[in-house]
Amino acid sequence: MLGMKRLAAAIFLLGGCLATGPASADTYPSRPIRLLHGFAAGGAADTLSRIIADGLSKKLGQPIIVEAKPGAGGNIAADAVAKAAPDGYTLGLVTGAHAISAATYKSLAYQPAESFEMISTLVYYALVIAVRNDSPAKSLADLIAMAKEKPGALSFGSVGFGSTHHLAGELLNATAGIEIVHVPYRGDSQSVTALLGGEVPVIVGTPVLLAPQIQAGAIRGLAVTSPARTALLPNVPTVQEAGIQGYDVRTWAGLLAPKGTPPAIMATLNAATLEVLKDPDIKQRLETAVGGEVRGSSPAEMKALIETEIAKWTGVVERAKIPKI
């Protein structure tokens, strides 16, 4: 009789564990959540991760621990998320580089669109094509004319091979019919240092980083890469204003989870994220961090964005004959 009671008690406890396990939507979340991103600590992705983690932690009632896994344009972190348990306790913040990787790498250990469950986009932001203030190029039209006069003589710096910054420059080459040679650096700060030191005559950088240098008169912003001017740099025209019609490069950031994460948990994460993005303080902090625009989405909309971006950047890579890694 005692043995039967012990067996019944064990079955009861096992049933309780199964009902309240880590993937149970009824109790989710019941412990801390990890949020991975693939870029250096202190950069834009890290800042965005910490802001959204702060908001989601308050909304979900559990700590959200931000963890940087930099390298390979965000691929190391994305791979870690793809291989994590699909229980809602490992999430990833990805940027526009997530879709670009599909175009610039021969193979990946995961599929950028199919290996994940999308939660929501967070923010969109433009880039800036800039020169030193003493450059003879006073406008983007001047730069294009200089590049056409001496094909291959000019170079532009970016945060690295396969970055949105890199492909924004390659798209300008393709649409304007010019040849400005790409020079990769390890991050925005290094590319700015290279521009100021005369290593490269042009860079593609982020508005937040370049705005102080532009306002101080050290750097001249020739154009922003979005169809409309940015609030952070209202006096810098767009690439389209320079006559390059159809040019549109905006990078973005969004949240995702491993493939197979239960639908109820995904619904909880999407709803919480959209609520957090409506918070005026969080919205201002996110937009200030990148000089961009907060914009949430449904999981389907985020997946469609990634698929569209993959097709777009694959075309740019093929036209520019960029060798894949």
Image (cartoon, grey):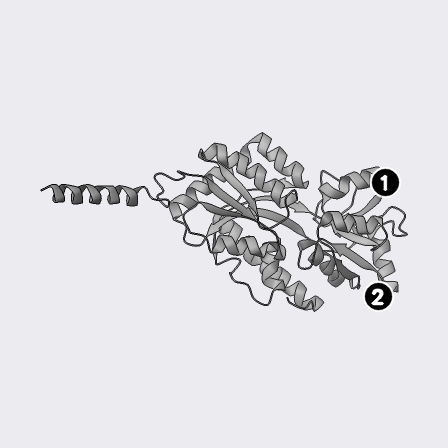
Residue 102 - label: none
Q: Position of residue 172 (x, y in %)?
A: 75, 58
Between 130 and 15, the residue placed more toward the observer is 15
Above or below 159: residue 324: below
Q: Is residue 129 visible?
A: no
Image quadrant occupied by the C terminus: bottom right
- Please name the residue that numbered disc 2 is placed on: 151
- Secondary structure at badge 1 equals loop
Between 46 and 171, the residue placed more toward the observer is 46
Between 281 and 224, the residue placed more toward the observer is 281
State left or right for residue 83 relative to residue 218: left
Local packing at callout 1 (Cα closer than 10 Å; few below 14, some 14-19, many 20+) is few
**Residue furthest out toward the top:** 281
Q: Name the N-terminal-most of marks 2 and 1.
A: 2
Q: Are marks 2 and 1 in contact (CB under 8 Å)?
A: no
Q: What is the quadrant of residue 214 in the picture? A: top right
- Residue in the image at 42% along x and 39% along y: 31
- Residue in the image at 87% along x and 65% along y: 150
State left or right for residue 189 relative to residue 124: right
**Residue furthest out toward the front:** 2
Local packing at callout 2 (Cα closer than 10 Å; few below 14, some 14-19, many 20+) is few
Residue 217 - label: 1
- Secondary structure at badge 2 equals loop
Structural distance between the alpha carbons of marks 2 and 1:
28 Å
Mark 1 belongs to which amino acid?
Gly
In front: label 2 or label 1: 1
Mark 2 belongs to which amino acid?
Pro
- Residue in the image at 64% along x and 67% along y: 324
Image quadrant occupied by the N terminus: top left
Q: Position of residue 244 (x, y in %)?
A: 76, 56
